[in-house]
Image (cartoon, rainbow, N blue to C red):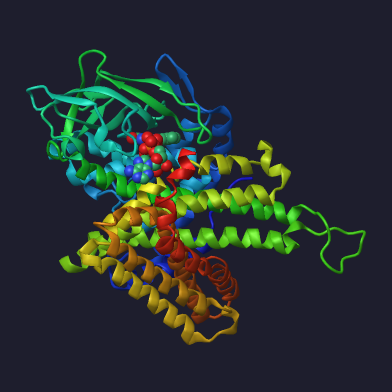
Amino acid sequence: MTYNAPLADMGFALKYGTGLAPALAEGLFGDLTMDDIEAVLGEAGRMAGEVIGPLNRVGDQNGVTFKDGAVTTAPGWKAAYDSWRKGGWNGLTAPGEWGGQGLPQVLNAACVEMWNAASMAFGVGPLVSMSAIDAFSAHGSEPLKRAYLEKLVTGEWIATMQLTEPQAGSDVGALRTRAERAGDGTYRIKGQKIFITYGEHDLTENILHFVLARLPDAPPGTRGISLFLVPKFLLNADGSLGKRNDLRAHSVEHKLGLHGSPTCTMIFGDEGGATGFIIGEENSGMACMFTMMNRARLAVGLQGVGIAERATQQALAYARERRQGRIPGMPATESAPIIEHPDVKRMLLSMRALTQAARTICYATALALDEAERGGDKAARQKAHDRASLLTPLAKAFSADIGVEVASLGVQVHGGMGFIEETGAAQHLRDARIAPIYEGTNGIQAIDLVTRKLPLGGGAAIEAYLGELRGIVEAVNATNDPALGWTGVRLEDAVASLERATRWLLARLGKEADQALAGASPYLRLFGVAAGGCLLARQALAALRLGPDAAPRIALARFFAENYSVQAGALERIVIEGAPGVLGADAVLSA
Ligand SMILES: Cc1cc2nc3c(=O)[nH]c(=O)nc-3n(C[C@H](O)[C@H](O)[C@H](O)COP(=O)(O)OP(=O)(O)OC[C@H]3O[C@@H](n4cnc5c(N)ncnc54)[C@H](O)[C@@H]3O)c2cc1C
């Protein structure tokens, strides 16, 4: 089954879940209107559904071929990429001066969701390139940008992001790839990187590798890391492709999922050193890489949303067709479509609700990025920047987990057929499983949220966010609409739990940090079920105001609040009371 972009749900999340409507009204994006945004989304939906979607299975079944250092992607892959990049999708948010369209991040977020729903193995390549464009635009020198940036923006060339080495995964500071000053302003790069997404391929003539490496006199750890642009082909003076640089793909990995995307081991400097150009200052590579990683983290969250949406569409279609058993009162000669069984309904509703909650959290993060870039004054921009920083680990980890959870429910809805590759439900689960691992594991995201993001601005960012959630709860309670059931009560409790857990964690940072670390992942989930519930409720309230067709949005918000936000109380207990049981249980693990 192919993919139909859920334009109504995406539009509703954008307009009413994230606050895009007031942002447009206030002129944050000049004269851009919601109609313009919907037109772009409609086109993107067509590209995703008609061009990329049909290749998802082809990529999964054919994988990539590695021969003599060259990688060939699956049949149809290159033509689809060409058509996608010629549509201008790669440079949607990139600056106009470099060939981009300067459109909002929040609009691009919806598009990134669609590329990845259509095919996550396809979407992961552009995801890295778009993140590289952000970092390169912000930190690259003018001559370097003049030489390389435009072709990256147009998608004529693709980027890679190269951090990981065998001994340096989550601990990036342990990397050993060397960079030596060549004396002419360039550097010679030597070393090995592993697990590099689209490290080698046949989609574009040149590949721009963004590589973290260490100078000989660099301080240890992350303070001694620099970022280099290391092109596959160096350029002649006229900008045409010149000499092949001293780097190669050594092999491609055989993976659980994402078969259509090459994941490469890369070797730099077999012949004395690959030529690299520094981005930013020496030893400031992590700051530049963080620009890239933060965008990529949000995009990985959107991969979770995309795959969850695709799995949901497939499960719904199957549940309407497949007949098994009877519902009460049905004649013995008949059988019901499984969608009519309450347990299957519950699974499908979970899939829909989790997807829309994660989607709205991701879009809200993207809108905060836009406000940080374009907001009225410096103070407003800083506030929005802190909001985006706070929400990025949540968007990444919560949504990546939702991708796996929803894809797994999708398999379950299919019964035995879900475990058989033929239906495609299994591929969604296999593909989804990488999102909680790469771009900083979800465990690392939770630690980032607790130890770096909660203390932002002396706790001001989280306080402001809690205030916003409380405002939504008050509005829900004020409606008194019986269709919302326990929504107001459950959300009020959930936000109170989030608030107490937040204060408890903040009080432990420093001397009792290990207790905070033990509770970081359950806290992130608590944050997700509380915030996700409120954002769905905000959409239900908007639907109520709009009048007709409010019922599905109200039912979805109610389902999430009564089935997921209600878990916040237990998660609060895990955070606050569970740490000693984690930290004092070494006997279990050493037994
Ligand atoms: C398909 C694929 C594509 C990838 N693409 C790229 C790419 O393009 N570029 C790139 O540079 N890398 C890429 N990676 C690498 C990926 O980012 C790493 O695998 C990831 O960061 C985790 O590192 P690791 O595998 O070394 O796991 P480890 O760091 O060894 O982690 C193992 C476990 O320990 C936990 N852990 C580790 N340290 C801590 C800590 N301090 N506190 C608490 N828990 C901890 C982790 O959360 C995890 O559960 C890719 C990986 C895959 C599989």
Residue 313 percent location from the top left of the image: 61, 53
Ligand 1 shown in quarter:
top left
Image check: 336 left or right of 34?
right
For the point 24% across and 26% down, the residue is 177
Image check: 20 left or right of 348?
left
Q: Is residue 38 visible?
A: no
Q: Is residue 484 above or below residue 130?
A: below
Toward which corner of the image does residue 139 lie, by quadrant? top left
Q: Is residue 205 visible?
A: yes
For the point 33% across and 69% down, the residue is 465
For the point 34% across and 52% down, the residue is 447
Q: How many numbered marks does the figure carry?
A: 0
The residue nearer to you, when weighing 350 against 312, is 350
Toward which corner of the image does residue 37 lie, by quadrant? bottom left
Residue 24 percent location from the top left of the image: 33, 69
The residue nearer to you, when weighing 63 against 348, is 348
Image quarter where the N terminus lies is: top right
Q: Is residue 346 above or below residue 250?
A: below
Residue 93 percent location from the top left of the image: 31, 51
Q: Is residue 299 above or below residue 456?
A: above
Residue 468 percent location from the top left of the image: 35, 74
